[in-house]
Image (cartoon, rainbow, N blue to C red):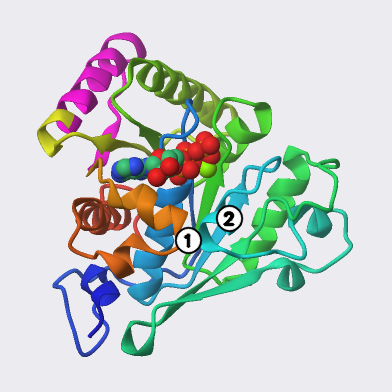
């Protein structure tokens, strides 16, 4: 059994981990957001996709940073088409989706990627209604267990909309004061936007990334929790803390997967734990 399989969250013979989520009859859309850029959304999205794919789930990563390519660069893909080609009707969804294959032998896994930008199409015709339609088509196709939306940093209207209509929001921050202030703004707007789109249920979890230790990550979470309790009368859950690990940038530079190359490194172990929490936390049940 190869190293990637150590991160399995759903038993698939011959190795079981004791964690057994039942298979969903519907697609769960998880948005990964942050106020400040560069906190680790794309790396986390790609790593989550890998752990989920290794666990037997069908996964699509949708690069929601429509101006700048993110996901394809980290994966070393060179997309021919992107979401703009689909929205403008030039190509079908199937033609726009890229297949990413990683690992080898028993550790082989694959997931799909919908690139945000291929570098050739113009960023025009992008609006909330057409994205809603696209996501609805992806849901109705029932092809995926999970769609991970790697959102653009910040609070532009399309990003806010995508966060609000997702089934689950992962709000990512580091312990830097600017990242904390910005993720607080993300959560505050999420509560407002979620009500506006008709969702009374708030499925937002925090991820504290690049923490110097789990203890300091939890302290960071508690700071945010206090602010949310006091000002928003609401308590975000903690999805997990991911430790700062010099092997993360090293892996990204090589366009390789940390989970494959250093499965025992702190950040790889933390991501495995994070995925279990994201899939099984007190959030929408995988019915
Ligand atoms: N746990 C970690 N330990 C060390 N470095 C990390 C960790 N997570 C992310 N990084 C580093 O942070 C940088 C930004 O990561 P990434 O591109 O995933 O962030 P992002 O939030 O998607 O950025 P953007 O907002 O620009 O899209 C990368 O260089 C990556 O190596
Ligand atoms: Mg990114």
Q: Secondary structure at mark 2?
A: helix
Name the quarter showing ligand 1.
Answer: top left
Residue drawn at (45%, 53%) of the image: 253
Question: What is the quadrant of the C terminus in the image?
Answer: bottom left
Q: Which residues are magenta?
A: 217-241
Specify whether residue 284 is in view.
Answer: no
Ligand 1 under 8 Å from disc 2 Cβ: no
Q: Is residue 86 left or right of residue 79?
A: right
Mark 1, residue position: 255
Mark 2, residue position: 73
Q: Which x, y percent locates residue 42?
A: 48, 47
Q: Which x, y percent locates residue 182?
A: 44, 20
Ligand 1 under 8 Å from disc 1 Cβ: no
Q: Is residue 214 left or right of residue 143?
A: left
Q: Secondary structure at mark 1?
A: loop
Quadrant of residue 259 in the image?
bottom left
Specify whether residue 37 is in view.
Answer: yes
Residue drawn at (71%, 40%) of the image: 67
């Amino acid at each position: 059994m190869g190293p990637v399989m150590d991160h399995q969250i759903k038993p698939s013979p011959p190795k079981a981990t004791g964690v057994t989520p039942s298979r969903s009859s519907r697609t769960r859309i998880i948005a990964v957001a942050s106020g400040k850029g560069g906190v680790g959304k794309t790396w986390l999205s790609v790593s989550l996709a890998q752990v989920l794919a290794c666990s037997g789930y069908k996964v699509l990563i949708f690069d929601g940073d429509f101006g700048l390519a993110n996901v394809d660069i980290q994966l070393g893909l060179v997309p021919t088409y992107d979401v703009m080609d689909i929205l403008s009707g030039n190509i079908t969804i199937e033609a726009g989706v890229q297949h990413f294959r990683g690992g080898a032998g028993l550790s082989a896994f694959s997931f799909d990627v919908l690139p945000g930008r291929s570098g050739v199409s113009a960023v025009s015709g992008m609006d909330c209604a057409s994205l809603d339609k696209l996501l609805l088509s992806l849901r109705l196709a029932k092809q995926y267990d999970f769609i991970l939306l790697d959102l653009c940093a910040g609070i532009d209207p399309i990003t806010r909309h995508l966060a609000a209509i997702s089934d689950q929001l992962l709000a990512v921050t580091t312990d830097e004061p600017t990242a904390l202030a910005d993720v607080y703004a993300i959560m505050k707007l999420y509560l407002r936007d979620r009500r506006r789109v008709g969702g009374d249920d708030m499925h937002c979890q925090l991820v504290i990334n690049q923490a110097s230790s789990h203890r300091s990550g939890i302290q960071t979470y508690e700071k945010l929790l206090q602010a949310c309790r006091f000002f928003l009368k609401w308590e975000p859950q903690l999805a997990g803390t991911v430790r700062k690990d010099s092997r993360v940038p090293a892996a990204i530079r090589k366009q390789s997967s940390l989970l494959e190359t250093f499965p025992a490194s702190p950040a790889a172990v933390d991501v495995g734990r994070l995925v279990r929490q994201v899939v099984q936390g007190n959030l929408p049940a995988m019915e």
